Image: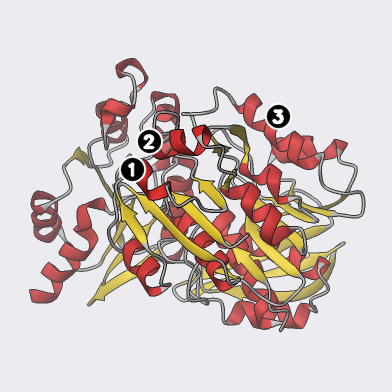
Amino acid sequence: MKKIYFIAICGTGMASLAAMFKAKGYEVYGVDENVYPPMSTFLADQHIPVFQGFDQSHLHKKPDLVVIGNAMSRGNPEVEFVLNEKIPYISLPAALNQFFIHEKMSCVVTGTHGKTTTSSMLAWILEYAGREPSFFIGGMPENFDGGFQVGKGEHIVLEGDEYDSAFFDKRSKFIHYQPDLLIINNIEFDHADIYNSLEEIKKSFRHLLNIVPGNGKIIANVDDVVVADLVQKSFSQVEPVSIKTPAKWQAKNITYNKIGTSFDLFLEEKLCTTVRISLPGEHNVRNALAACVGAFQLGIPVQTITQAFDKFKGVKRRLTLKKQVGEMLIFDDFAHHATAVEQTLRGVRDRYPDKKIWALFEPRSASAKRKIFENQYYDAFDRADEVILAPLHRPDKVATNERLSLENIILKLKEKNIPARIMSPGEEMVHYLFESKTGNDVFVFMSNGEFAHVPDSFAERLIID
């Protein structure tokens, strides 16, 4: 097998997988409808040709295998041609399994929140320890050149997504990853476009737990009641971790300051080490705790783990400081779930207790735009001093009766005396922020999109001034 073709190659995961195949010596090419930076630039740098727009003629010289992205569906001309011509095809997670995972020790990081950060931490600890891991992460770890690596070592670290695999395989992606080491940070209702309830998500996690081998390890955050309940029936060894609940592994004596966070790591009530990370917030303590215990299970000495964290730089768009102008800070964050919004703002407040915190949120993802999460948003912004909500992105993608009401959130915030308004991202927002700044502000932009480039535009306006 030599030629591999990607349908919808410009997705972050698809582009990374294409580059992994390229690194292993395959001839790789693909197609997408919207080909633009940064993914077009990334693929060009990897010398991977990309067709613009779907057309079955691209497949007339048949590849050996077609990887079909999970955004693709029946009716796409290239998908139809693949099926009609019986060209071998596969999903992204199945391709990872077949070509990259089966020969490695699979370390899979799951949970509604914190997957990208925790998997980046674990991959970096292995790298720092000289283990030369492979990894596949749905973000950009700052310690590496990108979200993937094809390493010579025995381990592969994977961000385990519970989203479905493809139109022809509705199982969660993580089912394909065959974990030897599994981290479960938390489980909440999410992905309301494909799941109808928390119970459906729990069913998928039960399936995952059931394929961890008996000699495998499960790192479980037992402060999360759903996780604690699910792992009770595991056939594998469970390593419980916590901050608040008595457990085998615990993070205690947590302290926050303007340069980072520290905590003491305890094993069965005995102090192992003190861990320092540059990231704020209790949620990042949980991420680091899980990564610590995961690395320890892989045979990394505690001292090496601690040293690795001293050099861990974080992940792009996970509370990334875009610009500091005087005492004003502009952060960019990927938060697109009410819990993630709450955790991000809690972490910012812990780090900057004396600053004015602005929460700027764009409901863009399929879940973020749905009314089912509305009550959670009423409290998610409590640690902000002022809130601006951008209008729903592509509201037509959600039925009218299922849409989040921004007006209701604004009313609830005003009842708590938190100034709040709805404002389209653009010049109006930049002007309002500029005129309303105090000089001692933290601006936290939260979206899984680009927020109409307002963080950059606002930073430029502050610099010019």
Q: Which mark is residue 203?
A: 3
Image quarter where the N terminus lies is bottom right
Furthest residue toward top? 401
Q: Amino acid at mark 2?
A: Pro
Q: Which mark is residue 77?
A: 2
Residue drawn 20% across and 57% down? 454
Q: Earlier in the sequence, mark 2 or mark 3?
A: 2
433 on left or right of 356: left
Furthest residue toward front? 61
Q: Amino acid at mark 3?
A: Lys
Q: Nearer the viewer, residue 3 or 34?
A: 3
Q: Residue 208's quadrant in the figure?
A: top right
Determine whether the residue tagged by mark 1 lies in a helix, strand or loop.
Answer: loop
Q: Position of residue 118 (x, y in %)?
A: 61, 61
Q: Earlier in the sequence, mark 3 or mark 1?
A: 1
Determine whether the residue tagged by mark 2 lies in a helix, strand or loop.
Answer: helix
- What residue does disc 1 label? 55
Query: From what the image shows, is residue 378 above or below residue 306?
Result: above
Q: Position of residue 400 (x, y in %)?
A: 30, 18
Callout 2–callout 1 Cβ contact below 8 Å: yes
Q: Earlier in the sequence, mark 2 or mark 1?
A: 1
